[in-house]
Amino acid sequence: MQEKFTLPFTSDFEKDVYLGLTKFPKQLSSKYFYDAKGDRLFQEIMAMPTYYLTNCEFEILENHKSEICNYFKNGTESFDLIELGAGDGKKTKILLENLVRIQARFTYLPIDISTNALEKLKISLKEELPELKVDPIQGTYFESIKTLCRTTKRKKILLFLGSNIGNLLHPQAIEFLKGIRDLMNEEDLFFVGFDQKKHPKTVLDAYNDHEGVTEKFNKNLLVRINEELDANFVLDKFIHWEVYDPESGTAKSYLVSTEEQNVTIDKLDLNVSFKAWETIHTEISQKYDSEIVDWLCQKAGLEVLQEFEDPKKMYKNYILKRATK
Ligand SMILES: C[S@@+](CC[C@H](N)C(=O)[O-])C[C@H]1O[C@@H](n2cnc3c(N)ncnc32)[C@H](O)[C@@H]1O
């Protein structure tokens, strides 16, 4: 076992898959859902009525775009609009269009781990908003934003939509928010979506559609391991399973092995054995209320400047800034 850790991993994906499948309980990171196929499946998920998050955030941005954009533009000549995990930018375009309309001077810097998502976003923005300055950055949130913040002197507006923060449990979310805070100057703003606690069935249904799209999305992790690391996962021998704990507000996605089986991952020189009903934990989708958001912010040295809610009161976007106290 010891020797295996000296394997010369050629990517974070290889390393994380190795470490995740050799630990107990097994886990894989949700950030690896997103390749061209994963991006497409996520777009299908967003289009499903059960995945309420997209519509809620869309409505908030549509209803409050003027006020939000004024916060971004106020007190500055020009700024950088940096988006963490931009995806297809469908909702962001509401803000981008409005900022262009009010003649704000800014550059849009979408960061995403998915090269495919960034490429598509760039092409669509060129068509839809040709006057917009776009500078896409492929990479993970922190590495990319740290590099970026070293080079920019302008006011920074950071966007983190889709309740992506919910992929982190509270202790990690606090570390993440602290990291963001440390990169922010006094005038910088952090605009972030936090999906709120609601009827547990509504939450469960969002990650458990009957058409099986979320299942395909979850299993795309195994497809990627098969294709990129020469593995032999048989998809039918795993089921997608979702649980939601209304007390903690944590929804968790699993892949569950339906039988005892062995999988080989040639590129990692690894044999992975599964007992019947053994799990691979793949995603967390944390739900919040305003007390929890306040607590997270307070722990991270941030404060809420303004919050916006959708008409059905299911989702909130917050404008955060560095705490003054
Ligand atoms: C759930 S989607 C949300 C997309 C968009 N923000 C929205 O609200 O519709 C997450 C996006 O973040 C990207 N992503 C996930 N984890 C990431 C990470 N650690 N670093 C950079 N991008 C990441 C994915 O590729 C994907 O495009």
Image: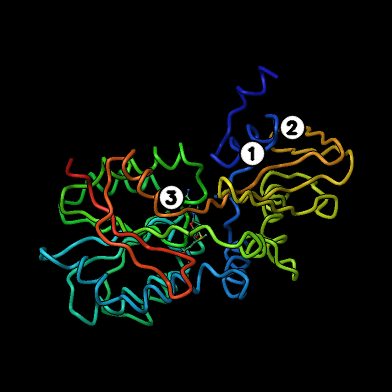
Eye-nearest disc, 2 or 1? 1
Q: Residue at x 36, y 77 (%)?
A: 94
Report which residue position mark 2 lands on. 270
Secondary structure beneath disc 1? Answer: helix
- Residue type at mark 2 is Leu
Residue 319 appears at what percent x and percent y?
29, 59
Q: Is residue 43 left or right of residue 23?
A: left
What is the C-alpha distance between the residues marked 2 and 1?
10 Å
Q: Residue at x 40, y 49 (%)?
A: 291
User: Is 223 in front, or is 20?
Assistant: 20
Q: Residue at x 70, y 33 (%)?
A: 25
What is the C-alpha distance between the residues marked 3 and 1?
18 Å
Secondary structure beneath disc 3? Answer: loop
Q: Is mark 3 within 8 Å of ligand 1?
A: yes
Q: Is residue 269 left or right of residue 294?
A: right
| Quarter of the image where the C terminus is located | top left
Report which residue position mark 3 lands on. 139
Residue 97 image-quadrant placement: bottom left
Residue 4 appears at what percent x and percent y?
67, 23
Query: Tag count in the figure?
Result: 3
